[in-house]
Image: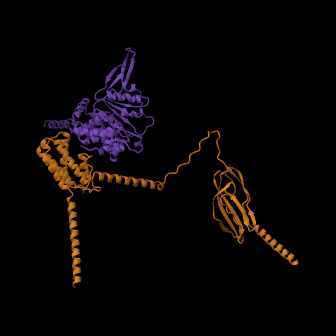
Chain colours: A purple, B orange
Amino acid sequence: MNETVDVKELNERIEKESSFVDMIKMEMGKVIVGQKHLVDSLLIGFLSDGHILLEGVPGLAKTLAINTLASVVDADFSRIQFTPDLLPADLIGTMIYSQKKEEFQVKRGPIFTNFVLADEINRSPAKVQSALLEAMQERQVTIGEETYQLPQPFLVMATQNPIEQEGTYPLPEAQVDRFMLKVVVDYPKLEEEKLIVRENIAKEFPKANTILKPEDIVNARNVVKDVYIDEKIERYILDIVFATRFPEKYNLEKFSAMINYGGSPRASINLAMASKAYAFIKRRGYVIPEDVRAVCHDVLRHRIGLTYEAEAENVTTEDIITEILNTIEVP
Amino acid sequence: MLRKAKFYIVYLLVFGLMHFTFKSNAQHITVKAKLDTTEFLIGDQIGLELEVRQPIKEFVGIPIFEQNVNQELEVLEQSENDTTLLETGHFIIRKRLLVTAFDSGYYALPPIPFLYYSDTLRTDPILFHVKTIPVDTSQAIKDIKRPYGAPLSFAEVFPWAGGSLILALVIFILIYVIKKLRRKEPIIRRIKPREPAHIIAFRGLEKLKKDKLWQQEKIKEYYTDLTDILRLYLWNRYSIRTLERTSEEILESLEISDFNDEEAYDILKDVFQVSDLVKFAKFKPIADEHEKCLSGAYNFVDRTKLIIEEKKDAEEDKKDNNSSLNSENEEVKMLEEQSNP
């Protein structure tokens, strides 16, 4: 009976604590028209301490969305445009010799901030990508002999353009895995685009107000961790991830030759975390299968490696995830 | 002696006159041979045209070639004679041959003979050049390419594929029969007709009631079984894929389909909501709620079972039987009336 009370209490607490979610959505809605999935995904990453990779053709408000989220939170924000000549030191910082003090001084890079927007991450060579991804994983940076902790909250939102592959350095699979979500941004609907045009040709472009402090995010993250996830849901998550590794065990023999490698244990962890965050956004204190299904594509699409057979048959990771969700029994 | 000399003089005169007539006519007859080109590649197929121009009353024999025109030119095809009547009272007869040559070099096509009674008319000779493909001697010598394999046609494959299929089928049937005989089982088994969805669901609900799971504090199992029974029922009854869908998705699917019983929809929604709370949020409803959900499930199945259609069918069958009986009775009556006027 006590357990029942716990979840009930938790539900009430989450309903109270998650009220700011609606506020953030409203403030972001002032600037970003439509793109509800993008806004939800940004909030999931933001609440579950996971980094986000955004992919979409130019002009879909990827950068604007991240900018707006940063402005809604009273946090430090820096934007780094990744270029082929960018160096790791341009990102994390370096030691500079001070003639006045006659010693080396640390010059911190733009990564020392709460929100990092890594624009067009695939334009920079592997060494710069590695520097960023290492910081993302360890949440610390070593300059010279000293190791510096990155501020809390620390969230990297990277963008990449899927159409211009000339002169790009695609992220290696191991590094892509460090992004909690890979969100594919699509074109807005006709009515939404009409509104976008109107807003952009008006005299003043709307601005989002700052409504949160960095400490609020840290608190919210702790509440998200408390969201109850039942054993049945855990099993459901594991079944989904295992189906990407051993499709033949889940009556998906047709994908055996198409999947080169499936989701890692990090995929299972992130799927559970993202489901919790989604339940929180929906102002619920427990995870239901709908939450898992809602975040599944974003969590898994960059974690499944396809074979040449799949490419030859035009089978995408999206198709595989959809088929897995349509095959695995829901608890 | 004089008679003999006379005969010889007449003979010589007639023969000389005839010869003179042929000769003079032969002067109005022309024969020609023409190649499409006098320079062609080895193995190329070109046309050779034979033409005779003659007065209507004359006859010129056009040569027929069996395989070769001469040693170099091989005949592949030859057309029928094509005759054209000219206004001048002449015929032009043409014949086309498709020829080829497999020896390179400069050759002369000798005059082709056309028979004209005892005379022979001949065409002009033609000089032609059979060229070879230029060979680059600076390149290394390459091996001869293997002949291209012709793709297999359906007609070639069909007998083999069909035969193998029949053989496989015979082997399969033999194995099946042997296995069945060894196990002493009937070779052909009667398949039980599929039970209606609501019968399966009612049986499941009865079992759930008897198992008394919630009374043993197995509340999660109780609601899991309850929703499984309803999901299976929906799959059997409406062919909605329920086992791989969430409660919300199942309800959405019902809305999209022709399901129009709002009350039944609300009952199902309530049962699913309570069940989801128990399954995923550790919710423990009061005892009345368990009974309410079970009776709700009974109610939902009862409201949505396929009984209306069955009734209709039965009624229609009854009507059909009655009408056929009536018509039979009428026929019997008529026959009786006819036999007993």
Answer above or below: position of A89 versus B64: above
Residue at image location 18% in from the left, 52% down from the top? B203
Answer above or below: position of A131 versus B137: above
The residue nearer to you, when weighing B180 against B25, is: B180
Residue B320 image offset from top left, x and y in percent: 23, 69
Quarter-wise, where is residue B287 in the image?
Answer: top left
- Tally of numbered discs: 0
Q: Is residue B251 left or right of residue A107?
A: left
Residue occupying the far bottom of the picture: B341
Residue occupying the far right of the picture: B2
Answer above or below: position of B100 versus B222: below
The residue nearer to you, when weighing A49 against A215, is: A49
**Residue A5 visible, this orientation:** yes
Residue B74 image offset from top left, x and y in percent: 66, 56
The quarter in which the N terminus of chain B is drawn is: bottom right
Residue B326 image offset from top left, x and y in percent: 21, 74
Q: Is residue B246 left or right of residue A257?
A: left
Q: Is residue B135 left or right of residue B214?
A: right
The quarter in which the C terminus of chain B is drawn is: bottom left
Residue A322 image offset from top left, x and y in percent: 32, 44
Residue at image location 52% in from the left, 51% down from the top? B150
